[in-house]
Image (tube, grey):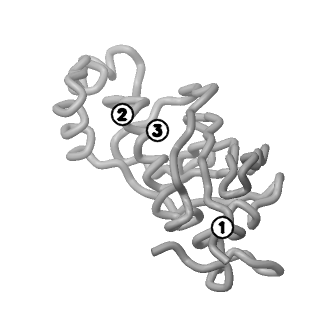
Amino acid sequence: MAPSPQESECTQPMKTWTGCWFEDFSVGDELVTTGRTITDGELAQFVGISGNAHPLHVDENYAQSLGFAGRLVHGMLTLSVGMGLMERSGVTKETILAHLGLERVRFITPVFVGDTIRVEMKVVELKPFSNGSRGAVVMQADILNQHDVVVVESVQSFMVGSAKKHH
């Protein structure tokens, strides 16, 4: 059950970023997720699920022969883990209605097994829907590694419920 507007922990002056309604967001708001280390097992599972067994992902010697420190984590695995970190942050816990889109995705820097990634999000646009029951929250979502280097950047849009509907 979605939190009531009175239960939203996303209130001023100190936002805790849990269960935020559309009205709780402001352009310029920022949030950083916790980190997560990508493991060898996760890479192996992604190879199996995706069917992408390119030698850059499965052959350490091959990857090193091309000048990489080791096997590369698939960009889509990095993006998927980043999206999971966003979900686990709780920012739209029980208030998100849909993931509307993923735009301008760029894979900037390689990610390797053992790297720890986190997501830095910034609200760049708010689009209320005409019926007032929800709106789109558009965020710049950058995934960074443990060295504070951006590895993936994207713009993501989410449909978030309105507290007005839940009065």
Q: Which residue is mark 3?
A: 79
Q: Amino acid at mark 3?
A: Leu
| Residue at position x 43%, y 52% in the image | 84
| Residue at position x 53%, y 53% in the image | 118
Residue 93 vertical placement versus 79 (above, below) = below
Q: Amino acid at mark 1?
A: Lys
* Label drawn at residue 17: none
Q: Residue furthest left?
A: 48
Q: Which residue is mark 2?
A: 73
121 left or right, relative to 143: right
Q: Which residue is mark 1?
A: 165
- Mark closer to the observer (1, 3): 1
Q: Position of residue 18 (x, y in %)?
A: 59, 72
Question: Closer to the N terminus: mark 3 or mark 2?
Answer: 2
Residue 162 vertical placement versus 100 (above, below) = below
CB within 8 Å, label 1 to label 3: no
Question: Closer to the N terminus: mark 1 or mark 3?
Answer: 3
41 left or right, relative to 165: left
Q: Residues within 10 Å of mark 1 (few under 14, many from 20)?
A: few
Q: Position of residue 81 (x, y in %)?
A: 41, 47
